[in-house]
Amino acid sequence: MSATFPFAPRNDWSLAEVRALFELPFNDLLFQAQTVHRAHFDANRVQVSTLLSIKTGACPEDCKYCPQSGHYNTGLDKEKLMEVQKVLDAAAEAKAIGSTRFCMGAAWKHPSAKDMPYVLKMVEGVKALGMETCMTLGKLSREQTVALAEAGLDYYNHNLDTSPEFYGNIITTRTYAERLETLAHVREAGMKICSGGILGMGESVDDRAGLLIQLANLPEQPESVPINMLVKVKGTPLAEEKDVDPFDFIRTLAVARIMMPKSHVRLSAGREQMNDQMQALAFFAGANSIFYGEKLLTTANPQAGKDMQLFARLGIKPEERQEHADEVHQAAIEQALVEQRDSKLFYNAVSA
Ligand code: SF4
């Protein structure tokens, strides 16, 4: 183990350092990642979230990996924004099967003023069930982040997807700078950030390093870092991309764990294509969060029962909700809201 072994989060990662991590022999890298992981987490606990698509398809963005983009013909059934009660029923079901966090995703460029009151009611309702709340709704204004935080939203998911250099090959309708701006608004409103990327889109190892550098070098590292493996959907421009080498995928999880030692690294989309051995290796590399349930937005996700069997075989237990952390988080939101109100930026969702 080197003398500079990084146990604490750092925000000054250079490309040379991250390249050096990617170039380590596999066993050395996994040993480092597991050591960092054990310094901050119970290595036998995995956080479990459920994800529900609350508005599916016809998205105006052109993300080349996404079956929900209106730019590609993938045969996906389009759906309008779900009724609030249906969302709350799904959240109650997720809670009953052991999920502690309920994530709601809408295929929008950004939420409209007309949709905001419904979205806020969903957050309030899920929160009232005693679950953590997370949403992914596209780009947000500062006023929208304040309204969501006040309704009780704990996490906002907005992925950076890939490195700034490779980004233009994947998305042309939204800039990298806009994504960083939304993340800054989320932080200012006192919410936690969920942000990660996708592997297998034709990116280089330097692009994977570049994505992790962007995430790790944010003023405050994201609490949750989803690392997705591209799900190749027919009709999308990336349908014929080459598979990622499973060891390269595990390597990226391990590097993410070392660079963001206190974040939950989430094994996210693409888990359906991973066998049990690969998932076990992913947990060893430091992944400690999964999506659970039947569907991951629009692509298949291993059945919840199968996940619990794998957990049992590996001696892994689902992470319990941390009440103390919630109280600290609530205090951060309240403080941010007071500051926003004082600067006359408070958003009145009812009249918007
Ligand atoms: S990833 Fe999100 S923003 Fe991009 S096309 Fe899909 S739903 Fe729209």
Image: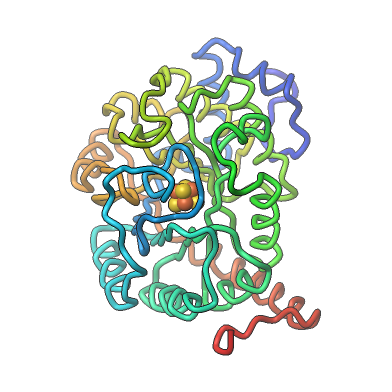
Q: Kindly identify the residue that appears in the image at 33 percent across and 40 percent down.
A: 316
Q: Residue furthest right?
A: 343
The picture places residue 236, in percent across and down from the top left corner, at 38, 36
Question: How far across and how far down the image is residue 253, in percent?
Answer: 50, 30
Where's residue 81, x and y in %? Answer: 36, 69
Instruction: Work out whether residue 347 or residue 310 is closer to the camera in this orientation and state it.
Output: 347
What residue is drawn where x is 39% and y is 73%? 126
Residue plotted at (59% across, 18% down): 22
Determine the image quadrant of residue 55.
Answer: bottom left
In screen coordinates, is 347 left or right of 135? right
Question: Percent position (x, y) of residue 132?
Answer: 44, 65
Q: Name the side, left or right, on which 305 lies relative to 105.
A: left
Q: Nearer the viewer, residue 186 or 26?
A: 186
Q: Nearer the viewer, residue 4 or 329?
A: 329
Q: How many marks?
A: 0
57, 229: nearer the viewer = 57
Does 250 appear above or below 52? Answer: above
Q: Quadrant of residue 32?
A: top right
Q: Is residue 185 left or right of residue 63?
A: right
Quadrant (top left, top right, bottom left, bottom right) of the C terminus: bottom right
Q: Is residue 211 above or below residue 277?
A: below
Compared to 158, does 187 lie above or below? below
